[in-house]
Amino acid sequence: MKFKIGNIEIKNQVVLAPMAGISNPAFMCIAEKMNAGLVYTELISAEAVIRNNKKTLDMLKGIEDINIPVAVQIFGSNAEVLSNAAKILTKLYPIKIIDINMGCPVPKVTTRAGSGSALLKDINKIYDIVSSVVKSTNANVTVKIRSGWNKDTINAVEVAKTVEKAGAVAIAIHPRTREQGYSGVADWKIIKDVKNNVNIPVIGNGDIKSIYDAKKMIDETGCDAVMIGRACLGNPFLLREAAAYLEDGTILDKANYIEKIDTAIKHFKLLLKYNDERKAVLEMRGHISHYLKGLNNVSEVRNKLTKVNSSEELIHILEDFKNNYTVVKNK
Ligand SMILES: Cc1cc2nc3c(=O)[nH]c(=O)nc-3n(C[C@H](O)[C@H](O)[C@H](O)COP(=O)(O)O)c2cc1C
């Protein structure tokens, strides 16, 4: 089912989560091929953007190649800095959605910079930030939050109402507190509470590992779309499976080993397109163990990959593994 974020139509209810070090243009292209309706970038420092930091600005290199809506996520704690960063980014890149991070639990972001989930402690500041960013740009502004700072200060509903009032056009919620980090389980009841208290679309997030979880979250909470993070690592196929299942109950076949390896190679080639070879190889080594999860006899190929330095070598090892895979399996 379609839904809208401001004036942008999203073709289905499946969203790739922002993940630092993972949700870059290469992985977002893969998510597009896997039929995601919307993708979020990893968090981008607003301070670094206004300082014109090249490495930070280059994080978006390639988003113009993505043909589905992209929400570019920025983080910071100062309304003016965030607004200026939104202005700069929307001038440099064709950005239609700017997302403000109010969920990151990492101390570097919260304690040192007062941003990410630390913002949840200050409702006035939230209003200030969102309304300033809305005024500064023509892009649609969205916010991603957690349920609150800790179990005694759960305030997702108040935060959601505040960002709506300030002009945000959608909200994504990962219903764990900052204190929880990634422990325990996401409390989907909070997604329902948020949905029942705002009129903007609510994107539910947290612990979706299967198509059935995706459907269950929508049924239980009434959220407009589901956002999937960790379960997409090495398994972006879950995005298309969830899209099909949510659309009309279709259960797609799981990706086989050929598609898994071919997708890993495609992912790597996209990383090479947007990064230097060293960075692409290092990043892909992390992804490959996820792509190979569940396949037989992967320890040898994993070992080989830890020593790889060149792109040709990496692709050769994967092709070789794929070409010999059935032989190994039939022994
Ligand atoms: C490696 C990693 C990096 C993440 N980086 C971000 C980020 O940059 N911005 C953000 O809002 N959330 C980030 N998150 C949180 C996810 O977007 C998501 O809210 C969380 O993983 C729960 O969803 P899941 O259970 O589907 O993984 C990150 C999560 C992981 C595992």
Image (cartoon, grey):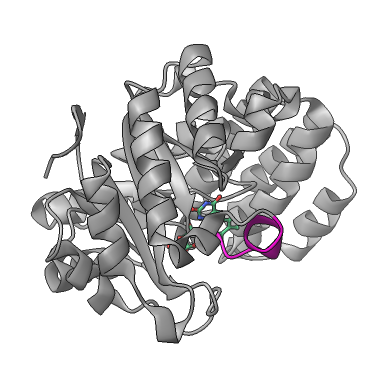
Q: Residue, x 48% and y 73% (percent of image)?
A: 149
**Which residue is at the far top?**
91
Which portion, as a residue range, is magenta?
104-112
**Which residue is at the far front?**
124
Q: Residue, x 27% and y 55% (percent of image)?
A: 162
| 65 within the magenta span | no
- Along the viewing direction, whichever of 185 and 77 lies nearer the viewer: 77
Q: Is residue 188 left or right of residue 220?
A: right
Q: Residue 304: where, in percent of width, then height?
A: 85, 52
- Number of residue marks: 0
- Does residue 207 appear anywhere in the picture? no
> Residue 34 is drawn in which quadrant?
top left
- Along the viewing direction, whichever of 128 and 147 lies nearer the viewer: 128
Q: Is residue 291 left or right of residue 142?
A: right
Q: Is residue 207 left or right of residue 285?
A: left
Q: Is residue 150 above or below residue 64?
A: below
Q: Residue 201: where, in percent of width, then height?
A: 18, 49
> Residue 57 is drawn in which quadrant?
top right
Q: Residue, x 78% and y 38% (percent of image)?
A: 281
Q: Is residue 301 above or below residue 323?
A: below
Q: Residue 155: where, in percent of width, then height?
A: 34, 72
- Along the viewing direction, whichever of 112 and 34 lies nearer the viewer: 112
Q: Is residue 108 left or right of residue 139?
A: right
- Does residue 123 appear anywhere in the picture? yes
Q: Is residue 157 above or below residue 142?
A: below
The N terminus, quarter of image: top left
Q: Residue 89: where, in percent of width, then height?
A: 52, 22
